[in-house]
Amino acid sequence: MGAALGQCLFPHSPLCQGLTILGSIEPDLVLVPKFAIDKLRGRQPFATQSSKLMLLKELSHSLPINTLLLIVGLAMGWTAIEAFFVGTGVHILVDALTHCGIEYRDTDQSCVWPFQNRLSKLGAMIGIWEYRYAPGVLIPKPAEAVILTVMIAIILFRHFV
Ligand SMILES: [Zn+2]
């Protein structure tokens, strides 16, 4: 997803394309150690999460923080910052569209930190498909598939027209 987005938005900048890819995976990097520990111990990944991990997940998946940093990047003309936070933003939006199962509500990030107490979780508001109901994490989620299809169409249009 990050690669297609970077190619769409920054077709002449490999650096910005790389930063968009990095941004699109950055929100989940805080989860890697917990996932590995749960798997090594034979537990269901993320069935239990500490308050520290929940806070890190909220911070890395905060659409308000991401939007603020993206606006700063745009205002300052820092294309590299813009590329990174565009990637992060699309990750957060896809997570919100695909994290909506009621049984996961207590352990899913809100995506609206620090406004999670005033707003509901974003997944509860705009979620359209719960990805954990489908087998395999490497299969594109429907929301990802739609976004990817649009971006690939844009890339092909730019290339051939
Ligand atoms: Zn995520």
Image (spheres, grey):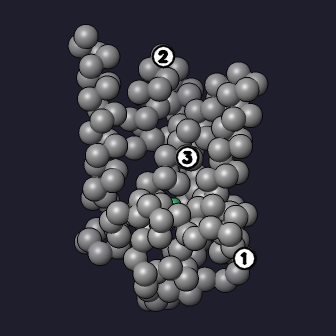
Q: CA distance from mark 2 to mark 1?
A: 40 Å
Residue denoted by label 1: 52
The residue lying toward the viewer, choosing from 19 and 116, is 116
Give the residue drawn at x 48%, y 16%. Answer: 12
Q: Residues within 10 Å of mark 1 (few under 14, many from 20)?
A: few
Q: CA distance from mark 3 to mark 2?
A: 21 Å
Q: Position of residue 37 (x, y in %)?
A: 55, 80
Q: What's the residue type where badge 3 is placed?
A: Gly
Residue denoted by label 3: 89
Q: Any mark on residue 12, and which?
A: 2
N-terminal-most mark, 3 or 2: 2
Residue lying furthest front in this view?
118
Give the residue drawn at x 71%, y 41%. Answer: 69
Q: CA distance from mark 1 to mark 3?
A: 22 Å
Q: Position of residue 161 (x, y in %)?
A: 25, 10
The residue lying toward the viewer, choosing from 95 and 11, is 95
Secondary structure of residue under mark 2 = loop
Give the residue drawn at x 76%, y 25%. Answer: 76
Give the residue drawn at x 70%, y 64%. Answer: 115
Q: Position of residue 146 (x, y in %)?
A: 29, 46
Q: Is residue 3 above or below residue 55?
A: above
